[in-house]
Amino acid sequence: MKRCKQDISKLGERTKAVHAGEVPDPVTGASAPNLVMSTTFVADADTTFSVEGMGQDDPFVYTRWGNPTIRQLEEKLAVLEDAETAVAFASGMSAATTLMLHTLKAGDRAVMSDVTYAAVAEAANELFPGLGIDIIKVDTSDPDALAAAVTGGVKLVYIETPCNPLLRLTDIEAAAEIAHKAGARLAVDSTFATPVATKPLLLGADFVIHSLTKYIGGHGDALGGVLLGRAGDLVPLRKKTSIRLGGTISPFNAWLIMRGLATLPLRMKAHEENALKIARYLETNPRITQVIYPGLPSHPQHDLARRQMKNFSGMISFQTERGRETVRRLAEKLRIIHYAVSLGHHRSLIFYLDTEELLATSFKLTTGKQLDSLRAFAGDGIFRLSVGLEDADDLIADIEQALNEGG
Ligand SMILES: *Cc1c(COP(=O)(O)O)cnc(C)c1O
């Protein structure tokens, strides 16, 4: 297939986002990527029926094994993340659980951030222990706590930075050093950062996970996930685990996400610009007791954010004195911002996460130190605001009228 006629790795991020992975159609010359919905491909007499015999560059056989539209998305993602290769999935959760099922067997031990995306935390609490896999939860933002937990015999260290929903960071370089010293691999969920902000593989991580549903797709209309890393890890992962678990992304979703991804660098610039304006406004609002945004000097890890993030992204969390009352007001009165879960869309979204509820359902933290760190970021509960691409002044006016309504 005819690729971009230049070595794409030498080009700028915006050029990569637009051109990487995309192939003009060899039959029609179509310039935009083709959407190939076919589940099956006409084979020749030598084609094997088991995926065991499949080579990396063999012709397409069946979409669960590989598909031209999905392949284009995987190539674009690999170029943007500076990864050797990528495997796309039906969702971020499918990427995360496939990585864990591929790298961990019964009797193995893993260390994971004590605060992660809720479904990841819940799988670590319930799904993996049931399979005989021991998962130790640690506040990975504290390198000493991480080093103490990662002893010999730990196979995988799994971190999320900035983490959902706290926006607490973990030092990727330090975590990679700790993991590798103990003979473990490091996986980083970089969904909140995106490759525009941080490239964990260049900081020593072995695997990167993204929910493509968020910033990378960027428009709230397609679920997807991806794993990125070395070909030596991911080629066997695709063959041995991903194809057998079957969490294949729909080619239609891959096509939508590829279209979103083309504008990621531009969108992240606008998300950051808007978020910084709104975070500064929130800090001046007397009803708001704490604002957490990595781009603000008041973020407890602002120095690490400046070192590790080239873009502070569009996620803000804030607290009010009576969160439970404020949530009713916001859900009813906001006119532009949607009161809804998810994040990273062009549309602004806000959702309230109650700390007690999170502790009871997802995080189940046990030590006083872990609880203190969680409370320092979350208080009794946070509003997680995903700042969209609307005009910042309109978003500020929307928050202002909703918070102040009824005195
Ligand atoms: C949303 C999210 C996930 C899960 O992704 P899905 O596409 O919803 O399965 C994982 N990690 C983070 C940080 C997320 O925000």
Image: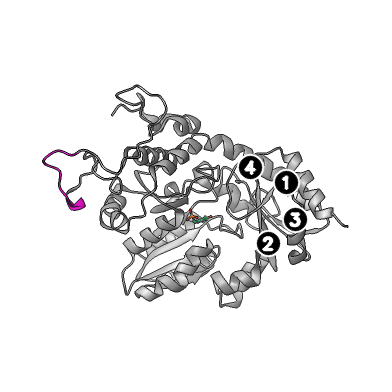
Mark closest to the chain's N terminus, 2 or 3: 3
Distance, label 4 to label 3, CA atoms, is: 27 Å
Along the line of sight, the residue nearer the viewer: 322 or 168: 322
Residue range in magenta is 43-52
Residue 384's label in the rendered image is: none
In depth, the one of 218 and 276 nearer the eye is: 218
Camera-nearest residue between 377 and 69: 69
Crowding near the residue tagged with mark 1, few <14, some 14–19, many ≥20 C-alpha atoms within 10 Å: many
> Mark 1 or mark 4, which is nearer the start of the sequence?
4
Of pointers 2 and 4, the one earlier in the residue sequence: 4
Q: Residue 388 falls in which quadrant of the image?
A: top right
Find numbered disc 3 in the image and state the secondary structure of the residue it sits on. helix
Give the mark toward the camera: 2 or 3: 3
Badge 2 is on which residue? 382
Q: Residue at x 20, y 47 (%)?
A: 54
Which label sits on residue 272? 4
Task: Judge from the rendering whether residue 48 lies leftward or rightward of residue 370; answer left or right.
Answer: left
In the rendered structure, which amino acid carries the disc numbered 1? Ile
Q: CA distance from mark 2 to mark 4?
A: 20 Å
User: Would you name the residue on which mark 3 appears?
Assistant: 332
Type of the residue with mark 4:
Glu
Query: Along the horizontal axis of the image, is 11 left or right of 316?
Result: left
Q: Mainly helix, strand or loop, the magenta region?
A: loop
Q: Secondary structure at mark 1?
A: helix
